[in-house]
Amino acid sequence: MASDNANIATAEQTSRENAEGLSFDRITRLASTVMQTKMAMISLIQDSGMPTLAAGPGVEELGAGQSLPFCHYAVNSDQPMVVTDAARDPRFENDAMVAGGPKLRFYLGIPLRTRDGATLGTLCTVDTQPRTPSADQISMLTDLARMVVNEMELRQMSVTDSLTGALTKRGFETRVEAERIRCQRAGFALTLVAVDLDNFKNINDRFGHAVGDSMLRSVVDVCRESLRNCDVIGRTGGEEFVIMLPEMPGPVAAKVAERLRQAIAEIRLPASGEMVNITASIGVAMLSPGQQTTQQALLRADIALYAAKARGRNRVVLDPAML
């Protein structure tokens, strides 16, 4: 269950960053044109569970991160959400967005749902005048919402490893660079943990790649169970992983790395009438505020990992700068 929740959280986080970091202006402009309104936006569900504005014309006017009162209803609906005149709707007539401020009247929102049923937010259009959308307009907005979801899923596929659900090397490096900048601005430490499975080739050779794939998935699952929601794991090679621990000082990160090593060593998978296990060598390096680049920190974590291999495998080695 913990790994399932982590997978969902990772997918939702990636979708939020896709919409916030990459422009959906073309689709939202089309939505605005179709509905003949000034404002058409994408709202995305945040950690609080509330959908907030993330992209599109109207975000600047209403405010990025603002939560529209209508979107909460839209994301919980199986149908397009239509409000022809919010001032005459008892659900919204006293809301600050309706009674004051921008004085919103019209709303049409289409829930953004993935093929597996996860709700990401809405594609919505609003106006300060009452409106009654036509069936064709609702249908076209529904098609545009489907385009948004398809684009999000395609972008997620490019940064998510299809076997394990971890980030790809590209996806991980993008995330860690953004987090490095944030942590350095705030004066926080950022720790990177390099993980390499010991003698993994022997499992593939002896039991087959299906068992090897199951082992890789199990390793990612047990790592996630030991990590916080803000921590990120990426698969950077066949049996190589890197974990980012934001705002975590070295001594705490060293304990987390040891916990990960123990959790991996306890994995048992049935194969050919016996139980298969594996160990991991782990290197840990910390990026202090104002020090080094992401690539330099990754290199130091790798050097510590190779030291763990040289000292007999199945152990954690810290970068000398952490000692």
Image (tube, helix red, strand yellow):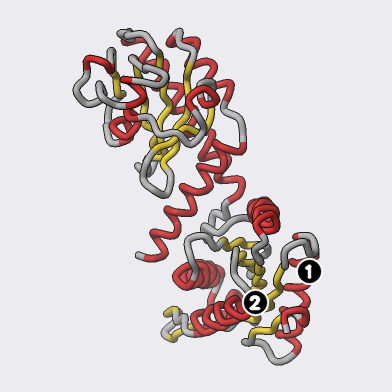
Residue in the image at 42% along x and 19% along y? 102
Seen at 77% across and 82% down, the residue is 320
Location of residue 233 (image quadrant):
bottom right
Q: Which residue is mark 1?
A: 299
| Residues packed near mark 2 inside 10 Å, few (<14), some (14 to 19) or many (20 plus) | many
Residue 202 visible from this viewpoint: no
Q: Position of residue 95 (x, y in %)?
A: 30, 26
Residue at the far bottom: name it.
Answer: 312
Q: Residue at x 67, y 72 (%)?
A: 194
Name which quarter of the figure residue 91 lies in: top left
Image location of residue 241, percent across then percent down: 63, 67
Cβ atoms under marks 2 and 1 closer than 8 Å: no
Q: Secondary structure at mark 2?
A: helix
Query: Horizontally, is 236 left or right of 135 in the view?
Result: right
Quarter of the figure with the N terminus = bottom left
Between 11 and 250, the one nearer to me in the picture: 250
Question: SS class of the residue under badge 1?
Answer: helix
Closer to the chain start, of discs 2 and 1, is 2
Residue 245's x, y, as percent? 59, 66
Residue ranking furthest to the left = 90
> What is the distance, in whole Å, between disc 2 and disc 1 at their CAs?
17 Å
Q: Amino acid at mark 2?
A: Gly
Rate crowding at label 1 as few (under 14), some (14 to 19) or many (20 or more) other CA atoms within 10 Å: some
2 or 1: mark nearer the eye? 2
In the rendered view, does 320 fall on the left or right side of 171? right
Residue 292 visible in the displayed image: yes
Q: Split into 4 quadrants, where in the image is the C terminus?
A: bottom right
Q: Is residue 320 left or right of residue 172?
A: right
Mark 1 belongs to which amino acid?
A: Leu
Determine which of the numbered discs, if any, sits on residue 48 in the image: none
Please say if 281 is above or below 55.
below
Where is mark 2, residue-wise? Answer: 250
